[in-house]
């Protein structure tokens, strides 16, 4: 209770700070709207053409180049300022100009300086954008949803980019943020943008040598400290760029290298699913009677567990760009981008649980329940225990080669061509050593703060001493699980685009283009091989991991410690198998030493070709009652998909006879039958974008469009495993992907009202509506398969295109500096935004403990989210304090290990901050921190009175030194 009260006080403090910042922001907007920006650039230095990078139309060319000749506008109707700003002001000004001048609804994050996005992680930088919600993996942002949809397209410099893992997008945790100049989020499409994201499009922009006037050198180095783990890790970045006039034209070369090492520790305490006692069952009726709850609804949690994850990440990124301008009308850009990401953790998992089997109360001890019959506290007897030490690794490498050329034969015509080759690989391993024991007595309490897990003996010496740290209590049972994956993805892409400017009339420009892609994805994923430990492991292979006083920042409601297989050995995949080989059965030793391998059905292969054409007309009128501009177009894309895999058939054969001469049956030799399925579809994706300039400062955007997102390659997997032998006579089951899946399509309506009252001051509000057709959900259908003369019906679980879904909502936000304040106080500023998203979508797999259908929102969607950012930027000092909050959301409609129950994430907020002191124009020091509020993340089964887990992650503090010339 003490810990819970402390967290309540912290939550109250955060809400108080939030309210104060909202009030300050409102005052600033109301005052700054009447005060034009004047003395806003004192003691500022040149911003390395941040300004020119941010003033394009908002549509990124495949090269990622922005119009370097454009000038930053001030307040509409005022002349552009000749004074160049830097730091946070420059990044906000650049992002604001992108939003204001774009032909679509776009929001951006722009690096304050070379190698310095506001957040170290790309996903965490994106969470500051209105309408974007992120998922975290072991303390770091890893994936995003835009306006409630996770089907988001990712690009680098306007081109495809992906992580080879069975999906279609880039894992945002893979890329070092130091490589990026900015990130643009397109929330509604126009015809020239590549299709593929009904949620939106995220474009990561890198720098080019022609972005700079001449020689440029920037280097940084820093150290990151992770307080829960107690470890420090380094990071470094260097960019060198120059351009020269030569006899064959102007040439520029840029090399940007980034290295980042991080660590993480995650402490987790979880309760197992709550099961209703069914008094029509004799055993459940006896338990209800023993608890004195006959005739009352009673839900028992079937156990509790501890997870402690200790790991590290390493990111290595490279960007090499060469630009050549042989004439004033011709320019070429060649670029190589490499992302090399390594992830590893070794964990201690300690669970006392029975799964869906009966858990037996100790009726001699008190039990408590809430008014709805949910278990709150009590003691159980002889609960099985698993003590697992595991290793998980992932190494993803993406190599991206591109060549872009643009030709301007006249001032009105632009012709461009682009070619890209991309190859990605991912290798991963999962290795788990399991020790078995028994909790003679397990006391647990849930529902009021962190779950409690206390284990002690039953007082009978013949059963052992009940100690969780005694090696002898883990000598019997246990085993080893082994799994590997290897994925390769490649793509060739080419495009041709033309733009022609028109003058003096309603029509302003004509654009069109063609695009072709050829993509392949090959994934090998082994089954989990299991090896039983037949002989007791020696003490030399075991260790005691202390928990009480260390786990969960000193939480004392856990065992003093537990016995595990040695984690240092587990961290070496080969060494683990060698150490365990002498202790498994002789028949399994050779297979264990060789390691798990792939069988034909472990391979899943897809090929995909797309043929695309688009046309776009830009139009507008300054003479209309309300000046306006816009674009209308259509993108037509044909997709051809080929999939290949195996139908794995295991026939029933006679393996002997019993004493009476009756046949005994078993499994025969496995047969692999190749299968392949081809499909194709053609979609026309129209779009309309309108911008009305109500006043020089106020504009209204209206947009209507259609978008699509293709199924993941994993969902298209045709492999299926059919087994004839059925000794229990239960319903035969199987699972598979679905190569006949069609893409999700969305009809979208958007409106945005934007008021720009200063170079770094705006207020905006937006509303959106999406009708999505073909949501993909796993359903069970009956299919018939034949073995010889016998046919059988199987319940086959496959992903299918389901019913329509609807997503609607609104966004509001803005930013400003309080320039009306005197002197140094004018350096203060603020950003704030709020998003509301409501969804209705099919979820056929969402059920409760009794199998009843549940209606839940879209997975990973919070109905409410907001950002509050306090800023200071004046002279040599730049600082930022950012708070991000989101309301509850569905993690999954069917949780693994949860009895297939939906799991919800409780509301969560996190505070991050940074402080930069610019010593001189060439040298700056930055201190920043994340998760400063030590936020606890909680999940629960459907309702908050049935908690699932409580999780704590590191607070990170970093110091970075940066030089620029």
Image: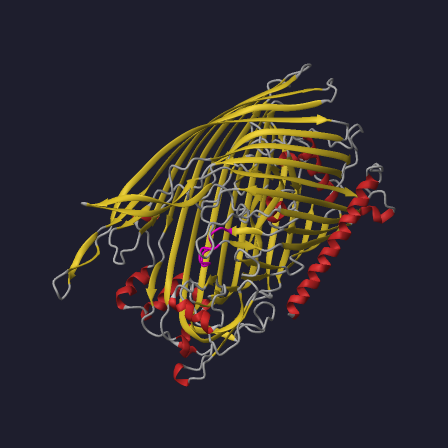
Point out residue 686 in the picture as x, y percentages from the top left corner: 54, 26
The vertical placement of 68 against 86, above or below, is above
**Horizontal side of residue 868 vs 557, given as left or right:** right
Residue 874 can be seen, yes or no:
no
Point out residue 195 in the picture as x, y percentages from the top left corner: 52, 32
Point out residue 691 in the picture as x, y percentages from the top left corner: 68, 27
In front of the other: 282 or 910: 282
In front of the other: 494 or 605: 605
In front of the other: 507 or 517: 507
Total marks shown come to 0
User: Which residue appears at 61% of the width and 68% of the height?
Assistant: 553
| Magenta span main SS | loop
Magenta part of the protein: which range?
892-901
The vertical placement of 454 against 250, above or below, is below
**Horizontal side of residue 823 vs 339, given as left or right:** right
The vertical placement of 173 against 495, above or below, is below
- Considering every residue shown, the one lying at the far front of the view is 295
User: Which residue appears at 61% of the width and 34% of the height?
Assistant: 252
User: Which residue appears at 42% of the width and 68% of the height?
Assistant: 285
- Considering every residue shown, the one lying at the far top of the view is 504
Point out residue 399 in the picture as x, y percentages from the top left corner: 48, 42
């Amino acid at each position: 209770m003490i810990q819970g009260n402390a967290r309540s006080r912290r939550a109250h403090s955060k809400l108080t700070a939030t309210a104060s910042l909202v009030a300050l922001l409102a005052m600033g907007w109301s005052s700054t709207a009447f005060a034009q920006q004047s003395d806003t650039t004192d003691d500022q230095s040149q911003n390395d053409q941040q300004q020119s990078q941010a003033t394009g139309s908002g549509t990124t060319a495949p090269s990622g180049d922005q119009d370097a000749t454009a000038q930053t506008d001030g307040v509409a109707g005022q002349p552009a300022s000749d004074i160049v700003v830097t730091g946070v002001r420059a990044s906000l000004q650049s992002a604001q100009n992108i939003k204001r001048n774009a032909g679509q609804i776009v929001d951006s994050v722009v690096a304050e300086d070379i190698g310095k996005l506001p957040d170290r992680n790309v996903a965490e930088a994106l969470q500051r954008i209105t309408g974007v919600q992120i998922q975290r993996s072991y303390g770091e942002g890893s994936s995003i949803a835009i306006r409630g949809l996770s089907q988001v397209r990712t690009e680098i410099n306007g081109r495809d980019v992906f992580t080879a893992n069975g999906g279609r997008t880039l894992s945002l945790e893979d890329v070092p943020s130091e490589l990026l100049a900015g990130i643009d989020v397109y929330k509604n499409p126009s015809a020239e943008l590549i299709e593929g994201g009904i949620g939106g499009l995220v474009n990561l922009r890198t720098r080019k040598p022609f972005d700079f006037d001449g020689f440029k050198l920037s280097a940084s180095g820093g150290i990151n400290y992770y307080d829960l783990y107690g470890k420090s890790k380094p990071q470094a970045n260097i960019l060198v760029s120059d351009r020269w006039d030569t006899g064959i034209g102007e040439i520029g070369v840029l090399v940007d290298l980034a290295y980042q090492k991080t660590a993480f520790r995650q402490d987790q305490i979880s309760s197992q699913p709550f099961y209703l006692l069914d008094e029509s069952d004799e055993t459940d009726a006896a338990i209800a009677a023993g608890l004195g709850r006959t005739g009352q609804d009673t839900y028992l949690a079937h156990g509790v567990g501890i997870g402690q994850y200790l790991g590290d990440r390493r990111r290595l990124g490279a960007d090499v760009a060469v630009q050549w301008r042989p004439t004033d009308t011709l320019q070429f850009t060649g670029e190589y981008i490499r992302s090399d990401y390594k992830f590893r953790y070794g964990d201690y998992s300690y669970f006392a649980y029975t799964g869906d089997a009966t858990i037996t109360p100790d009726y001699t001890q008190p039990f408590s329940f809430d008014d709805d019959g949910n278990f709150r506290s009590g003691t159980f007897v002889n609960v099985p225990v698993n003590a697992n030490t595991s290793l998980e690794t992932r190494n993803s490498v993406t190599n991206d080669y591109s060549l872009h050329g643009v030709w301007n034969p006249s001032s009105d015509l632009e012709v461009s061509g682009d070619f890209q080759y991309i190859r990605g690989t991912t290798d991963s391993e999962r290795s788990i050593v399991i020790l078995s024991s028994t909790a003679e007595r397990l006391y647990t309490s849930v529902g009021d703060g962190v779950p409690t897990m206390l284990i002690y003996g039953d007082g009978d010496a013949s059963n052992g001493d009940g100690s969780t740290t005694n090696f002898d209590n883990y000598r019997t049972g246990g085993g080893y699980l082994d799994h590997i994956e290897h994925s390769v993805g490649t793509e060739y892409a080419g495009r041709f685009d033309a733009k022609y400017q028109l003058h003096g009339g309603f029509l302003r420009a004509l654009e069109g283009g063609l695009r072709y892609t050829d993509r392949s994805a090959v994934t090998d994923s082994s089954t989990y091989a299991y090896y039983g430990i037949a002989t007791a492991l020696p003490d030399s292979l075991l260790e005691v991991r202390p928990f009480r006083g260390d786990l969960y920042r000193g939480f004392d409601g856990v065992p003093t410690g537990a016995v595990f297989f040695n984690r240092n050995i587990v961290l070496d995949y080969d060494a683990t198998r060698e150490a365990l080989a002498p202790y498994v059965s002789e028949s399994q030793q050779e297979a264990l030493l060789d390691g798990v391998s792939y069988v034909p059905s472990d391979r899943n292969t897809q090929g995909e070709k797309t043929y695309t054409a688009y046309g776009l007309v830009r139009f507008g009128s300054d003479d209309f009652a309300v000046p306006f501009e816009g674009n209308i177009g259509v993108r037509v894309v044909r997709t051809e998909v080929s999939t290949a895999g195996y139908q794995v058939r295991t026939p029933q054969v006679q393996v002997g006879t019993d004493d009476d001469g009756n046949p005994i049956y078993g499994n025969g030799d496995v047969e692999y039958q190749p299968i392949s399925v081809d499909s194709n579809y053609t979609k026309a994706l129209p779009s309309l974008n309108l911008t009305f300039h109500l006043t020089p400062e106020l504009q209204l955007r209206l947009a209507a469009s259609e978008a699509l997102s293709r199924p993941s390659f994993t969902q298209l997997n045709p492999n299926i495993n059919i087994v004839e032998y059925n000794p229990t006579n239960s319903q035969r089951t199987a699972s598979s992907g679905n190569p006949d899946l069609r893409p999700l399509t969305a009809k979208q309506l958007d409106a945005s009202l934007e008021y720009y009252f200063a170079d770094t001051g705006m207020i905006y509000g937006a509303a959106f509506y999406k009708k999505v057709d073909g949501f993909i959900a796993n359903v069970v259908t009956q299919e018939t398969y034949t073995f010889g003369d016998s046919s059988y019906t199987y319940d086959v679980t496959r992903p299918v295109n389901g019913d329509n879904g609807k997503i609607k909502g609104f966004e509001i936000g803005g930013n400003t500096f309080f320039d009306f304040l005197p002197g140094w106080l004018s350096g203060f500023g603020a950003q704030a935004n709020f998003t509301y998203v409501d969804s209705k979508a099919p979820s056929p797999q969402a059920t409760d403990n009794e199998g009843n259908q549940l209606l839940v929102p879209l997975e990973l969607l919070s109905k409410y989210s907001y950002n509050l950012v306090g800023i200071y930027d004046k002279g040599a000092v730049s600082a930022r304090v950012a708070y991000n909050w989101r309301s509850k959301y569905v993690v999954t409609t069917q949780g693994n290990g949860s009895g297939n129950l939906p799991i919800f994430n409780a509301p969560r907020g996190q505070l991050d901050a940074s402080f930069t002191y610019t010593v001189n124009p060439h040298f700056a020091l930055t201190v920043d921190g994340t998760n400063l509020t030590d936020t606890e993340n909680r999940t629960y089964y459907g309702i908050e009175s049935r908690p699932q887990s409580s999780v704590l992650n590191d607070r990170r503090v970093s110091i970075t030194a940066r030089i620029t010339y």
